[in-house]
Image (spheres, rainbow, N blue to C red):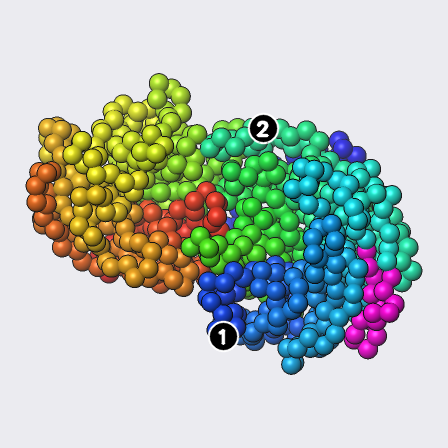
Amino acid sequence: MRTRSSLIAAMAALAASVSLPAHADQVFNRIATFPVASNLPEGVDAATPTSSEIITATEDGDTLVYSDSPLGAVGFIDIADPKAPRAGGVVKIDGEPTSVVVIGAKVLAGVNTSKSRQEPSGNLTVIDIASKTVESSCDLGGQPDSVAASKDGRFLAIAIENERDEELNDGEIPQMPSGNLKIVSMKAGLPDCDAIRTVDLTGLSEIAPEDAEPEFVDFNDAGEIVVTLQENNHIAIVNAETGEIVSHFSAGSVTLENVDTKKDGKLSFTGKVENALREPDAVKWLDNDRLVTANEGDYKGGARGFTIFSKKGEVLYESGSAFEHVAARLGHYPEHRNKKGIEPEGMEVGTYGEQKLIFVGAERASLVGVYEDTGAEPEFIQALPSGIGPEGLLALPARNLFVTANETDLVEDGGARSHVMIFERTEGQPAYPMIQSDNDANGLPIGWGALSGLAADPKTPGKLYAVSDSVYGGAPAIFTIDATQTPARITARTVITRSGNPAQKLDLEGIASDGEGGFWLANEGDLSKLVPHAIFRVDAEGEIRQEIALPAELVAHQTRFGLEGVTTAGEGDDLTLIAAVQREWGDDAKGQVKLLAYKPKTREWSAVRYPLEKAETGWMGLSEITAHGGKLYIVERDNLIGDAAKVKRVYAVSLDGFKPAELGGELPLVEKTLVRDLLADLKSASNGYVVDKVEGFTIDTTGEAFVVTDNDGVEDSSGETLFIRLGNIAAVN
């Protein structure tokens, strides 16, 4: 069995190594993004944390219903017009809702009311959809996790997890009391609280058999329930009518090849993980005889992919590292979380036309993989960007829609809120990804992310270069981009080196061609990390040939918000490097930052002051600078995200008016002209929320302008990289 699984995984990895489809007859594209905080009741602080975890829909498909654990509520979203979702309000619940289903006119929510993990309790709460009121509840005798309804509406299955305490005994199990499965009979559309049956799941698994930890449940058309026991690495099949266990089996293990195994700031897919326990989270039936699991891992394992089993426990398909490689090519690989990789957690199955599709949500990659069920090896169709931490996935084939619920809310850190995202299946081409990488010479993904600076090749139209910032400090790199293709392709990665070894203490934020095959790189310093404020010159192989430190009179006033872009003006002895400082330093007037000028021939520094827009909240700063056609084009932005974002703009400063003065004296203030407000571009690029880090801008030899965003290496980020083509610069404004 293990040999067959490994062979299938290798075939899947090979299939995923080819280009993503350039065209598909039917594809999903995001049409709307709904911030869950929009559903906060009147009078509640807008900064109150919210979440959308598990999501379902009313039977007509016009209203989405989701569980909001932090708020202690069940939320509603009106999607009668799916391109313009509207807040439908919330129903507050006494407890923490963990899952929701809809039967007829009622929402049935599993609610956790536990005093502690050692004293678990919970109930099944009934909510009337029309009146949005709580009508009744059934005591469940434990902490519910997943809830599912049978296809005919006769039964509910509820996984009573009684989850372990990760702080107790280092999280080791067993931790009593054990969980179990509840089967609830429905009468006239309501749960029969007096006829709830308990299915004992202890004694089945090899791992902690006395402490069953059921996680997720689903029904097939034959009225059978599949339940995953995640920490126990086990799966059971239960007959809903009789409550008997039909079969049960270990979820087994996978040996993973070509995966990133070290949290070292490098994206290197050459490692190996022996016998990783699958530890499945979500599970869905593909038909009455096959089921598919998302192998997140939560205890000792995590197999980074998904598996198709027969209901007897035969492994029919194992994705291995293939899905993870897809994420890596799209810049969505979370290097800082590589113990369990991308952590596939969510799972959904839906039939659209003649295609049965499998949707796999990767929590740490913030990505959903879409595959067609072929009956054998699934065919990869596309990947969907999905906010931060996709948890709930919902197929709505009758409306040609697909929905994701993203549980993470970073409001306390000023980050993105929890969002529900709506995708429509139509003819056309996928809007995402906008940029992706090819394979390297060994057939493995060119790992990338956190693109923080952009430059054009001085000779070849559509050939661009980007740098990654300190997120990948273990292997800082220059990426070669072919922007003549859609999506744009990262065709090569050149690691920056000192004496042949990957350079340390770099936070690259800007790049410019040196006209001789090499590059000038702007390094943003951070005194606390011994990272210098400097400009580096590297050759075509990435070897550092020169380091230009900022002068003492500048460094005396430094902050960590240093150089964010570099460009060149003039030639020969008149060559001047011009660098943008992101924010005010100690000697700057409030609302003014420096544009620095350095002449390599004479080693002279000078500067001007640049006027920033006023920031009502957050801060304002510069992200990029590029010279073209007698102008300096400068990206100015706030650090705000989503609906709070106000300033993401390209301004121009005439080089004729750029007269830098000697440091230490009065510096002239330049005049700027608005070239492009990028907010509309960011909103329409993929119908997501506005991201904060517009970090790269350049213009190629034909005058075509390009913008790229920094995805922070998927650290507290959706992982989305927007690569936007603005058209010819002469027509941009």
In-image side of 585 versus 543 (left or right): left
Residue positioned 55% across, 39% down in the render: 337
Q: Nearer the viewer, residue 26 or 33?
A: 33
Q: Secondary structure at mark 2?
A: strand
Q: Which kind of residue does numbered mark 1 sit on? A: Glu
Determine which of the numbered discs, if any, sits on residue 42 in the image: 1
Determine which of the numbered discs, if any, sits on residue 271 in the image: 2
**Residue 724 spot, x, y in % from top left:** 37, 53
Considering the image in quadrants, where does the N terminus appear?
Answer: top right
The answer to whether residue 41 is magenta is no
> Of discs 2 and 1, which sits in the foreground?
1
**Residue 38 spot, x, y in % from top left:** 49, 69
**Residue 655 spot, x, y in % from top left:** 12, 47
Q: Secondary structure at mark 1?
A: loop
Residue positioned 17% across, 43% down in the render: 587
Check whether the beta carbons of the residues at disc 2 and disc 1 lie within 8 A of each other: no
Residue positioned 88% across, 67% down in the render: 195
Query: Callout 1 environment at 10 Å: few (<14), some (14 to 19), or many (20+)?
Result: few
**Residue 229 spot, x, y in % from top left:** 76, 47
Q: Which kind of residue does numbered mark 2 sit on? A: Gly
Residue 251 visible: no
Marked residue nearer the N-terminal end (2 or 1)? 1
Q: Residues under labels 2 and 1: Cα distance? A: 52 Å
In-image side of 205 versus 327 (left or right): right
Determine which of the numbered discs, if any, sits on residue 637 in the image: none
Query: Callout 2 environment at 10 Å: few (<14), some (14 to 19), or many (20+)?
Result: few
| Span shown in magenta | 181-197
Considering the image in quadrants, where does the C terminus appear?
Answer: bottom left
